[in-house]
Amino acid sequence: MDSSQIVWAGVIASGCASLGTAAGSLGVFLIRQLSRRLEDALLSLAAGIMLAATFFSLLLPSLEYGSTLYGGEMAGGMVAATGLLTGAFLLFFIHQTVPHEHFVSGREGASKTKLARIWLFVLAITLHNFPEGLAVGVGFAGGEMANGLSLALGIGLQNIPEGLAVSVALLSVGFTPARASLIGIGSGLVEPLGGLVGAVAVSGAEAFMPWALAFAAGAMLFIISDEIIPETHQNGNQNIATFSLLIGFVVMMLLDVLLG
């Protein structure tokens, strides 16, 4: 694949992955309420898929590319570690400075102005979805079609329960089903943008591939650890949340094996 094909593949695949968010968001017309237990289980299932995608589709290729390009496993490991921490710290900085609102833990981020709650929700969802699109885009590094497709499929699957949980949460705080689903669908549209950024980053310079892969992994790990796990473990549902995460991890691991 040449650079333009990688870019198009990243954009199209991340766009397809965002359809999972749309499908889940439209589910609000059928399911008007989720129990806290089921919502925690669904979000943890999504987290498990993201976690496996982080390791098998992002970190491992980053280590392999880094070892080849920079002359050894130690050099490759240092590149992956640096890229991962950079991605995590950037997401941390964004979370600290951009006001947004979690569905359980509430408002977060510095703000001197009172934004409408709907926009705080939208910002929270956007902060969550952009790294996922970025991950799909960089998954096509080196023209690795199978790796990019497995990432897109995995993230598309985990977007379904996420989209449903987000729309139902918006419904519970007073939004109509139509408005809640539209916000959920709109939040998924940021993923193709992330896919474009990621694909462009890895299509132009081979030396940048391991950095971009590890950066996307760090951003996704931060989302999992900072947002999903704390929110699903503070309602007394930590056991089902833990096993749902493990199931999601296994599902994505098997998808990676089958498609890779």
Image (spheres, helix red, strand yellow):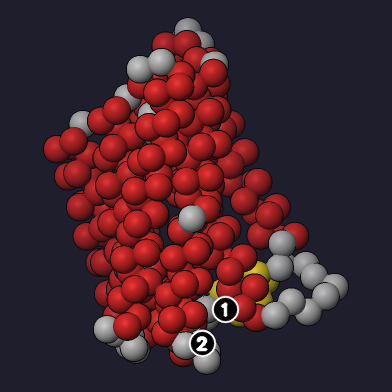
- Where does the image place residue 28, in percent across and percent down from the top left? 35, 80
Nearer to the camera, 72 or 129:
129
Between circles 1 and 2, the one closer to the viewer is 2
- Residue at (39, 75) in percent of width and height: 165
First along the sequence among labels 1 and 2: 1
Which residue in the protein does label 2 denote? 175
User: Is residue 240 toward the left or the right of residue 116 in the image?
Assistant: left
- Where does the image place residue 163, in percent across and percent down from the top left? 39, 68
User: Is residue 93 toward the left or the right of residue 4 in the image?
Assistant: right
In which quadrant is the N terminus drawn?
top left
Answer whether residue 60 is visible to the viewer in this image.
Answer: yes
Circles 1 and 2: CB distance less than 8 Å?
Answer: no
Where disc 1 sits, the SS reads loop
Nearer to the camera, 75 or 34:
34
Q: In this view, does 10 lie above or below 171?
A: above
- Residue at (65, 54) in percent of width and height: 92
Where disc 2 sits, the SS reads loop
- Where does the image place residue 24, in percent across and percent down from the top left? 33, 69
Name of the residue lying farthest toward the right: 112
Which residue in the protein does label 1 denote? 105
* Mark 1 closeness class: few <14, some 14–19, many ≥20 residues within 10 Å: few
Asked which quadrant contains residue 60, the reply is top left
